[in-house]
Amino acid sequence: MSTPRKLAAGNWKMNGTAAELSEVKTLLAEQAAPGCDVLLCPPATLIHRMAQAAEGSILKVGGQDCHARQSGAHTGDISAAMLKDAGASHVILGHSERRADHGESDEDVRAKAEAALAAGLVAVICVGETLEQRESGATLDIVAAQLGGSIPDDVSAGTLVVAYEPVWAIGTGKVPETAQIAEVHDFIRARLSSRFGEAGQGVALLYGGSVKPSNAAEIFAVENVNGALVGGASLKAADFGAIVAALSDA
Ligand code: PGA
């Protein structure tokens, strides 16, 4: 059975200008050799400069979205190849904010993921239920549909990361019980294993939604949690560094 690599991933969302790159320098100074992979996904405007700052270090840099096409008349969009060219190794796809704000469907996410794989990027595909869906008992059905619809057929353990992010936990300070996280992560692992066999065993499964230094260790102790996708707490080197350290120790 292949063991997933642990990954601490930060999603800066629409935050950060060149001034905030100092946080990256602090992070790298404090986390020179962590026991896990570390990824930061800044706004597209900072990818190149962050990748330059990270050169030769453990830090990988990713995008937050890409277009499904390689090039063309798509004003304001960025292709996977462009992210790669700017220095990205990963791209977050299907984040709930993109699904909600831009109406992205599972089919859209899958097409983007195919483009990401073709460009040589690792696709970090996000899934997760709304509060209404959880309260109506639909969580596993929703997650199953998103997994089935959003993930391309030709992924491998090294080219796919799945992030479980309950929409109601994102930016709210609310975190599911560890038993709730375990239930969904076990479910995702089982679905990936049955669809992709050995490769599905090796895909890193991240939990996302209000992860902080104070709750990280408890979350990382849950089976089938191989890391975190961190929003707000990834903006400050001290907080993100503490989460990286908790994952290294897990
Ligand atoms: P949060 O965001 O850590 O600020 O809740 C997580 C995410 O949206 O990836």
Image (cartoon, grey):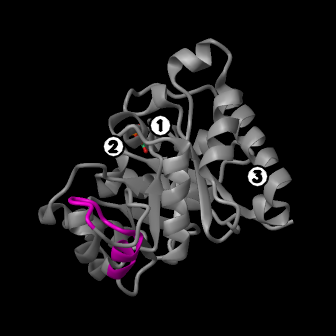
Q: Amino acid at mark 1?
A: Gly
Q: CA distance from mark 1 to mark 2?
A: 9 Å
Is the C-beta of the residue carrying label 2 under 8 Å from the nearest atom of ligand 1? Answer: yes
Q: Which residue is mark 3?
A: 192
Name the one closer to the observer, 100 or 232: 100
Q: Residue at x 38, y 57 (%)?
A: 65
- Mark 1: which secondary structure? loop
Q: Earlier in the sequence, mark 3 or mark 2?
A: 3
Q: Amino acid at mark 3?
A: Leu
Q: Magenta part of the protein: which range?
A: 73-85
Q: Which residue is mark 1?
A: 209
Q: Position of residue 58 (x, y in %)?
A: 46, 77
- Look at the image and say whether residue 214 sits in the magenta stretch: no
Is the C-beta of the residue carrying label 1 under 8 Å from the nearest atom of ligand 1? Answer: yes
The answer to the question of whether label 3 and label 2 lie on touching residues, with beta carbons closer than 8 A, is no
In front: label 3 or label 2: 3
Q: Residue furthest bottom?
A: 56
Q: Residues within 10 Å of mark 2 (few under 14, many from 20)?
A: some
Q: Residues within 10 Å of mark 1 (few under 14, many from 20)?
A: many
Q: Quadrant of the N terminus?
A: bottom right
Q: Residue at x 66, y 21 (%)?
A: 138
Q: Quadrant of residue 240?
A: bottom left
Vertical relation: 158 (above or below) 179: below
- Look at the image and say whether residue 75 sits in the magenta stretch: yes
Q: Which residue is mark 2?
A: 232
